[in-house]
Image (tube, rainbow, N blue to C red):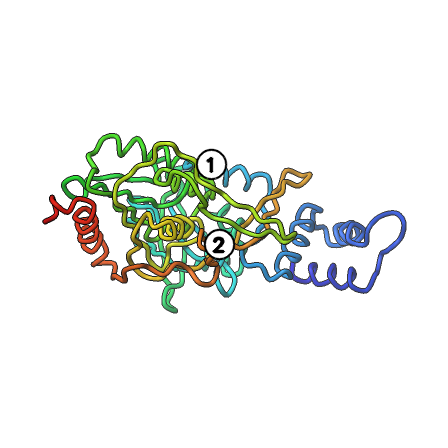
Amino acid sequence: MAIVLSLMIASFGMGFFTNSQGSSVDQALEQIAAEQKISPSELERAAIEGMLRASGDRWSNYRDADEVAAQEDELDGRYSGVGIWLRPGNGGGTEIAGVKSGSIADEAGLKVGDVIALIDGKDFSSADLPATVAALRGRPGSTLEIKILRNGLDNDFTLVRENIASPDVRITELADGVALIRIEAFSEQVSRDTLNGLSQLQYEKGIVIDLRDNPGGVLSAATDFVQLFIRSGLVVSYDRGSGKRIAIEAANAKPINVPLTVIVNGNTASSAEVVAGALQDRNRGVVIGTQTFGKGSVQESVTLSNGASLETTVGKFRTPSGRFIDKHGITPDVSASERESITRSLEILKALNAISDPVKGS
């Protein structure tokens, strides 16, 4: 495939195959498909992926129609797999961005940052994200062999695929009058599930929002979540290449009005960073933990004529105060280790309650 790509790029650059009957790329596809016995669809994908690599954009992707359908299921919180979220690796290939609690991957010991090397004996060390995701999917109950790289060492795992349909939100009572909202990813149902879970608890003393190891997800799901706690005003913005600014603002007549803390770590990324940055800049929540990942680029998808999707970067997120998230991340208001984060959250909520009710807090 690499040889085919090289031939196509060389042909395009030198102006070969150019005439009035079609573009040079179209004719190159036809010629190579005839001579090399490679299907046009494979060549089209190789050409598009080659262009994406040439752009240098780590976060751009091409997904065929089947991969698009699978992604929609994942973003809706329903899919068959092993319970991991993936992201493009720094040096190419794919690495684990998040592990769903209680999943087969979690029980087996897969960790955020593990690099996918082999899947069922096939080399995926340089494969793109959609291809790796597709290889991990399969019939529930089927066995999957994965080799990952961790700290320079190989690790082998045998996993059994399962239906993943559990919510990405878990809400529990952390202390008397304090709720803990643990969000593993921002899928479509997060706000609804949050409200349903909170309706079962007393949380008048505050809420702890745990975004550790949250790889992001659907931007609208993240901004809808922020709006649960903010009446109005800016949530996030970004400037498109055309210079047009896109601003997303809150509109909630009855927001939840209790003290908030937000726990983050180095694997809190993308739309999860949007949430942390918005609540921090709007003085709505105290951010606790360690510096976040710094993935603040905005991707948009265009549906192609064959039902496939081309996802490209169109801008960089800014928090309400104008800070860029990309390559910077969110700096916590209070630094805390993983072990200390919950304790510090409870201490801060206690202090915030004392400030709002000095008589009770005295």
Between residues 327 and 52, which one lies in front from this camera angle? 327
The mark lying in front, picked from 2 and 1, is 2
Residue kind at label 2, given as amino acid type: Arg
Q: Residue at x 38, y 49 (%)?
A: 282
Tell me if 205 is positioned left or right of 310 in this view: left
With respect to residue 359, does 125 lie above or below? Answer: below
Between residues 135 and 195, which one lies in front from this camera angle? 195
Disc 1 target residue: 73
Q: In this rendering, does residue 57 appear at all?
A: yes
Of label 2 and label 1, which has the lower sequence position?
Answer: 1
Q: Residue at x 69, y 47 (%)?
A: 39
Q: Residue 300's spot in the image, x, y percent?
A: 57, 46
Q: Secondary structure at mark 1?
A: helix
Between residues 73 and 206, which one lies in front from this camera angle? 206
Q: Quadrant of residue 193?
A: top left
Q: Residue at x 46, y 58 (%)?
A: 323
Q: Residue at x 47, y 41 (%)?
A: 249
Disc 2 target residue: 318
Q: Residue 309's spot in the image, x, y percent?
A: 60, 43
Q: Count the marks.
A: 2
Q: In this rendering, does residue 121 appear at all?
A: no
- Dot 1: within a 10 Å radius of its alpha carbon, few (fewer than 14), some, or many (20 or more) residues? some
Rendered-image quadrant of the N terminus: bottom right
With respect to residue 160, does 319 lie above or below? Answer: below
- Dot 2: within a 10 Å radius of its alpha carbon, few (fewer than 14), some, or many (20 or more) residues? many
Q: Secondary structure at mark 2?
A: strand
